[in-house]
Amino acid sequence: MVMIVQPEPSTLAHYAVTAGNIPPIATQIYEGLATYDWDQNPQPNLATSWEIAPDGKSITFKLREGVVFHNGKPFTSADVQFSFMEILKKYHPFAPLLLAELTGVDTPDEKTAVLLLANPAPYLMKALAGRDLPIMCKSVFEGTQILQNPSANKPIGTGPFKFGQWDRGQFVRLDRNDKYWKPGLPYLDHIIARFIPDAATRSAALETGEAHFAGYSAVNYADLARMKTNPILDTTMKGYEMTPALSVLELNAKHPPLDKKEVRQAIAYAIDRKVILRDVMYGCGKPATGPLSSLFKTVGFYTDDVRNYDVPDRLKIANKLLDGAGLPRGANGMRFGMHLEVNSFGEQWLRQAEYLKQALAIVGIDLTLRSEDTATWLRRVYTDYDYDINEPFLSQGVDPVYGLNKQYLTSQIRKGVTFVNDSFYANLEFDGILNEAMREQDHDKRAVLYKKAQQILAEDCPLVWLIDVQYVSVFNRKLHDHTTGPLGTQQAFERAWLET
Amino acid sequence: MRFARYMGYRLVTALPVILGIIVLNFLLIHLAPGDAASVLAGESGAATPEYMDELRHKFGLDQSLGMQFLTYVSNMAHFNLGYSYRNDADVSSLIIERLWPTSLLMLTAFGTAVALGIILGLVAATGRNSWRDNIISLISLVAYATPGFWLGLMMIVIFSIGLGWLPTSGFDTVGAGHEGWAEVWDVARHLVMPAVSLALFYLALYARLMRASVLEQTGMDYVTTARAKGQTERRIMTGHVLRNALLPIVTIAGVQAGNLIGGSIVVETVFGWPGIGTLAFNALQSRDLNLLLAIFFMSACLIVIINLIVDVIYVMLDPRMEI
């Protein structure tokens, strides 16, 4: 089976780098303690059962018997302890959010691991999949420099496929793990992840049948309509239920007049999200209604009961707000000028920026677009804070804790750190709600807190939420059972099979 | 003996040039804002300042520029090109992996372009304003004006999707496990379209250059002299005109051969060819300094060597020139 991964990962060190192009390969090799059903409930995987202590401060995992790593070493609680404490807690980019409460891992016996927490961490139960918290083999890493370990690019895990070969610039080959603990699985003998930098050629490789699967919108949105008419191909939007993401505008509140709430709201009113959805995203997604992706509806955290910026008389409101903020139109019809930093990760962002320039000109805001390469752009926005409006794309993780905490907490105004609170939003009441929700064990109480948090954010409008992004997979009709759960391309293709 | 001494002299004088290039590249690269740690952390979504400090420490970015430079030069002096932290691999192995596909593509394309260009130019010039001259001139004009990436995509549409003759992309059929001649055939099938789309532009250039050059030489006095001596037209063409007409081709080809190691980012991207061009581009985007400097260094060395070869060819073609 040949799948297309775009772009080629720079490394397969899944435990230390969370770039989105690594998991489609790495999750074939590394597994997590649990996996998730379509309702996003944790299901047994490397752990067969678990129990959360009544005070929420420890989680006891019973581990599966008879699991061996690809190097032949048996999987035990020592591997869980080492993976969590020595690798993930120290080097995983999300550890400061996800594992902040983790103080230790007890291993009363070989098949029991107890995660010890300083405070309850209900979100942890959503992050046990191989994509988020993979389990590595202790003996591979012990006594070495973790970040320089040779297994970074020759990963060793417990998964259905073993690492075979990486020809840089071309492909990664994964081979069937004959000793996989699920009897009879996987069905495929090999998975080949191919890297084709040009979007048109990627589409061509699918159309000729050279490649069978392209997830994560590796195919250009513009080509999707053509793909759908091809008799050998089909598309699906399933498999991204636990990969919520929003495209947004970050507004720098240190740069007047963006410090005024009315001005930020006016910008939110001035934009027609339906145009972006139709002309930039080719219909893949929904207009965003607030700070959380609507994918959180499944688990009950999403609400659209917030200030609605998509109303029929939105332009009138925007103009009124700007007039009220003391920003009259000048001789050329413009009220003030701003720079928009164009996202460097692909041309769709330039198209979105072009639309934004038009849309904001209607209400008298004169945008100047600035395109720079990734390193320059990230430095300008997150280190130098030398920007007015930025158009990033924000992954929201599997629990509101990821997306909300790092983006809006006052403590997350951290110079030099990318994709955190760079719009200088600081609201103590809101901070209190988020911190409470983070530790609240009762699901319904959490939902109430997050609803309140979303309402406050939508009112304060530190960011403008544009599109609730929907990824698309394109696949050959001969490939079956490729998307078997809500993690989709970011979980193993253990049941996938290819018609001959 | 004289030849060996000349070569030695040229190689020794090239050393300061290469050193100068290293220094210049090093400084230029450090002028670019942003660093590898911020790109890496940016791709990961979020990271702690401590994590980024650790990355910077690991990459050696926390040292002063002078220190970084000294470390780099001393590594180079030991033929150690360094380590690419972004790719978790040795720079030399990264480059060597790509060297074979790049040289295969570039030499095929370049060789075809030079050889065919010379022949076509000669054919056009000897039949000036005839039908074959017009056809060749027209074709070379079209080829010269066609962007390589467009040609590449059109070929994919026609020969891969439409006719199904050739694979869309890649270096060989992954996982097919071909050996011996089957592998050669497989690579050749993958090579055709990228080589053609790359060669066509150069081909047109050399054909036009060769035509002009031959026409200029045929008007020279020495041609009249040779004709007066009673030599056949064929002999005049091969013995006298061709040699002299080749000089400008060698000059231009020498300059363009410098691009060989850099590869062609456009063609590599369209055909997913694992070349050095994309490697360099990605290294620049991610501020992978060790890798980028090593590629620059190799390009510099190659250009010095090619210049030397061009000078030697001059002497072979034109006995008036001396070493």
Image: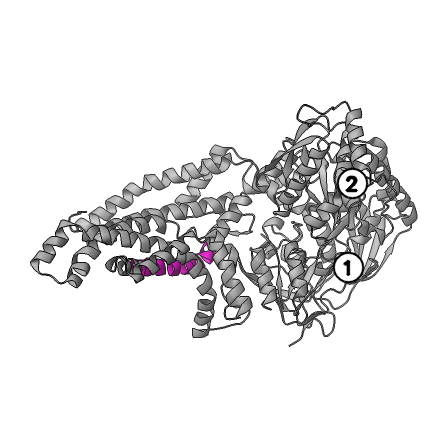
Task: Provide residue A98's location: percent of width, then percent of height.
Answer: 76, 46
User: Which of the 4 image quadrants contains residue A30?
Assistant: bottom right
Task: Provide residue A238's location: percent of width, then percent of height.
Answer: 75, 60
- Chain bearing tag 1 is A
Q: Residue furthest left?
A: B229
Q: Which mark is residue A405?
A: 2
- Chain bearing tag 2 is A
Q: Earlier in the sequence, mark 2 or mark 1?
A: 2
- Please state, as top left, top right, bottom left or bottom right, where the C terminus of chain A lies in the image: bottom right
Residue A194 seen from this side: no
Magenta segment includes B98: yes
- A119 or A363, nearer to the observer: A363
Task: Provide residue B240's location: percent of width, then percent of height.
Answer: 17, 56
Mark 1 is on which residue type? Pro
Residue B38 seen from this side: yes
Give the residue at x 28% y 45%: B11
- B20 or A342, nearer to the observer: A342
- Please state, as top left, top right, bottom left or bottom right, where the N terminus of chain A lies in the image: bottom right
Disc 1, SS: loop
User: Which of the 4 image quadrants contains residue A134?
Assistant: bottom right
Give the residue at x 61% y 51%: A144
Query: Left or right: where does residue A362 sit relative to residue A143?
Result: right
- Which residue is denoted by mark 1 in the rendering? A486
Q: Which mark is residue A477?
A: none
Q: CA distance from mark 2 to mark 1?
A: 23 Å
Q: Is residue B289 above or below residue A477?
A: above
- A449 or A49, nearer to the observer: A449
Dot 2 surroundings within 10 Å: few (below 14), some, or many (20 or more)?
some
The secondary structure that most of the magenta stretch takes on is: helix
Mark 2 is on which residue type? Asn
Give the residues drawn in magenta, as a range: B94-118
Query: Left or right: where does residue A339 sit relative to residue B310?
Result: right
